[in-house]
Amino acid sequence: MSLIKQNKRFLLVLDDVWNENRLSHDDSLSLFVKWAFKDREDKEYPNLLEIGKEIVKKCKGIPLAIRTLGSLLFSKVDELQYWKFVRDSEIWRLEQKEGDILPALKLIMIKCHLTCFALCSLFPKDHEFYSDELILFWMANGIMPNSQNLELEDVGYMYFKELLSKSFFQDVKCTWFYRFQMHDLVHDLALKVAEEEYSVVYFHAKNIAGTVHHLSFSHDDCGQDVPKYFDTLNSGVRTTLFPVEQQVPTLVEACISRFKYLRMLN
């Protein structure tokens, strides 16, 4: 802030200034409505507004939490279950520092979305996905947080719709479920997000990182024998995929016997 007085210029810096007084519930709700709804849209969705009032109470008058949560729910007026999921999330029960209620919630939801997206890296490029199958994979790995009022299939569907809305998927066809693909560049992004816990495994590889917990055997060079590096793989592997029609029986048996914590074998 620059001040000019009697031809002299001063610089006044206000650092780390906090308002100890919380917003009233009415003020908090007004702020939430501003960020969660379009103009007068809250009047059209009284059921969502009632849920919003309960969410606002949990924000404890913290403007940043109210604003961020409102923006998270913006344009989701046709997804009642998503609103209920946010309201009933287990994260509200966690003990957190002052003012950290919503950022923590948002980070957890973002982390879950990225983890769901990362699992897509295990499939080859040009793979045709099925939404119901992909959601089952997420469920099997316990990726999505549980909610007392929602079935995990519903939570998975919301996560799928969120990724779909952000254009992570393409060539989408909808019947009783969704069929879709990923653009090659988006697939490369999934590989980047996956980092060291997810890996496509090649039979001719010399070794595999010990941090890998989710792996997919390449369909390009499936051999007839269990690869030599297999015994060095992390016994805590959770996911094993064989994206080929002709599987190697000895390799499947080896996966079942070695990976004691296996959650998904496909």
Image (spheres, helix red, strand yellow):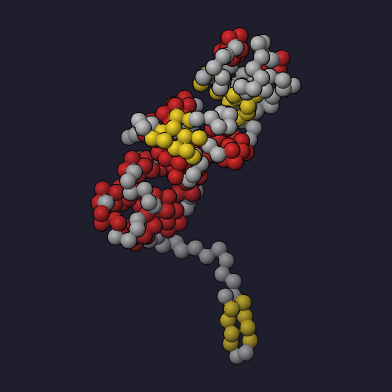
Q: How many marks?
A: 0
Instruction: For residue 179, say whether it is visible.
Output: yes
Residue at point 45% right, 41% down?
Answer: 164
Q: Judge by depth and name the residue closer to the eye, 49 or 13.
A: 49
Rendered view: 10 above or below 110: below
Q: Is residue 61 visible?
A: no
| Relative to 63, residue 81 above or below | above
Image location of residue 77, percent across then percent down:
33, 49
Image position, residue 115 (x, y; %): 53, 35
Q: In what quadrant of the picture does the N terminus appear?
A: bottom right
Which residue is at the far bottom? 6
Q: Position of residue 54 (x, y in %)?
A: 32, 48
Splitting the image into 4 quarters, where does residue 179 fall? top left
Q: Viewed as shown, does residue 208 lie left or right of 4?
A: right
Q: Residue at x 29, y 60 (%)?
A: 40
Q: Is residue 47 left or right of residue 87?
A: left
